[in-house]
Image: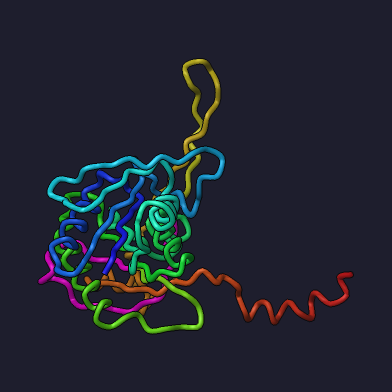
């Protein structure tokens, strides 16, 4: 199986290194890495159209597979690998392992999810993988789990559905022995408090710094069956995501409302 590995944390991020080493240790997997040259988190599905892209060989300690450092976005990294860098199309695209979970509305901004979604748009089964937490992370257990998941996909491909979809995988932090299981979930609701910090540079010019913090939702239990609920229960969350965003019930409700507009 040919696997394309990408991310949004950058080609030198520890998450992609751990996953690369875990995958290349499994028999039958032919791995290629194509990832942004620097961190491009929260960039969404941006692609580069107005300047050239550069792809340069890179090194991950212990890795023996082809590794490319791409000057563009996560989606660029997937697209250029599939269309230009790889001699044959990959059988699977994996984006990750991301530092920090991608749950709820995070998926709308996530470069990790967008890099996998680009694979889906190109007709390739795709995974986005994230590890809960931000400090003192051990990516080893998540890497081993993803390698197991890839072997499962090789033996039993994803079930077909009316729309192409990707799997958004969120893994609990901590040893695998402490995980409570695997749940197939739906997106939960995660709220952010956004802040615009207005500042002045040394020349007196105003600039703005966008930041935000996750609201503390632990006071109320997460809705059962959601990705946030699964992580709260120390379970791996697997959420199928599709790019068909049309709200069918709203479309039908709008039909009589739109009559007579012209």
Q: Quadrant of residue 127?
A: bottom left
Looking at this rendering, what residue extends furthest in the front direction? 87
Q: Start and end of the magenta stretch?
A: 169-193
- Residue placed most toward the observer, 41 or 146: 146
Q: Is 186 rendered above or below residue 74?
A: below
Determine the residue positioned at 40% across, 55% down. Answer: 78
Q: Is 170 rendered above or below residue 21?
A: below
* Horizontal and vertical percent position of residue 138: 15, 55
Q: What colouring does the structure picture have?
A: rainbow
Determine the residue positioned at 35% across, 80% down. Answer: 158
- Residue placed most toward the observer, 193 or 17: 17
- The number of numbered badges drawn on the structure is 0
Q: Is residue 58 visible?
A: yes
* Horizontal and vertical percent position of residue 60: 19, 46
Determine the residue positioned at 52% across, 38% down. Answer: 51
Image-based side of 92 in relation to 163, left or right = left
Image-based side of 30 in relation to 157, left or right = left
Image-based side of 258 in relation to 213, left or right = right
Quarter placement of the N terminus? bottom left
Quarter placement of the C terminus? bottom right
Determine the residue positioned at 28% across, 53% down. Answer: 33
Q: Quadrant of residue 132?
A: bottom left
* Horizontal and vertical percent position of residue 218: 32, 65
Q: Is residue 100 visible?
A: no
- Residue placed most toward the observer, 29 or 183: 29
Q: Is residue 63 magenta?
A: no
* Horizontal and vertical percent position of residue 235: 24, 73
């Amino acid at each position: 199986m040919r696997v394309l590995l990408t991310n949004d944390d950058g080609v030198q991020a520890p998450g992609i290194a751990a996953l690369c080493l875990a995958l290349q240790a499994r028999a039958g997997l032919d791995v290629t890495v194509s990832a942004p040259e620097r961190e491009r988190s929260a960039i969404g599905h941006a692609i580069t159209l107005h300047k050239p892209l550069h792809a340069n060989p890179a090194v991950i300690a212990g890795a023996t597979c082809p590794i490319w450092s791409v000057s563009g976005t996560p989606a660029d990294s997937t697209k250029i690998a599939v269309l230009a860098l790889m001699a044959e199309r990959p059988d699977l695209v994996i984006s990750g392992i991301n530092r920090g979970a991608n749950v709820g509305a995070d998926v709308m901004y996530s470069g990790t999810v967008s890099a996998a979604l680009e694979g889906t748009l190109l007709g390739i089964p795709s995974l986005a993988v994230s590890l809960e937490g931000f400090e003192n992370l051990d990516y080893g257990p998540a890497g081993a789990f993803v390698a197991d998941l890839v072997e499962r996909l090789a033996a039993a491909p994803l079930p077909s559905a009316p729309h192409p979809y990707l799997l958004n995988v969120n893994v609990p932090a901590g040893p695998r022995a402490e995980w409570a299981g695997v749940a197939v979930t739906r997106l939960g609701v995660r709220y952010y408090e956004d802040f615009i910090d207005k500042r002045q540079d040394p020349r007196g010019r105003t600039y703005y710094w966008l930041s935000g913090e996750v609201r503390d939702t632990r006071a109320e239990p997460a809705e059962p069956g959601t990705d946030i609920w699964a992580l709260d229960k120390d379970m791996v969350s697997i959420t199928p995501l599709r790019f068909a965003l049309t709200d069918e019930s709203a479309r039908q409700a709008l039909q009589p409302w739109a009559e007579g507009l012209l």
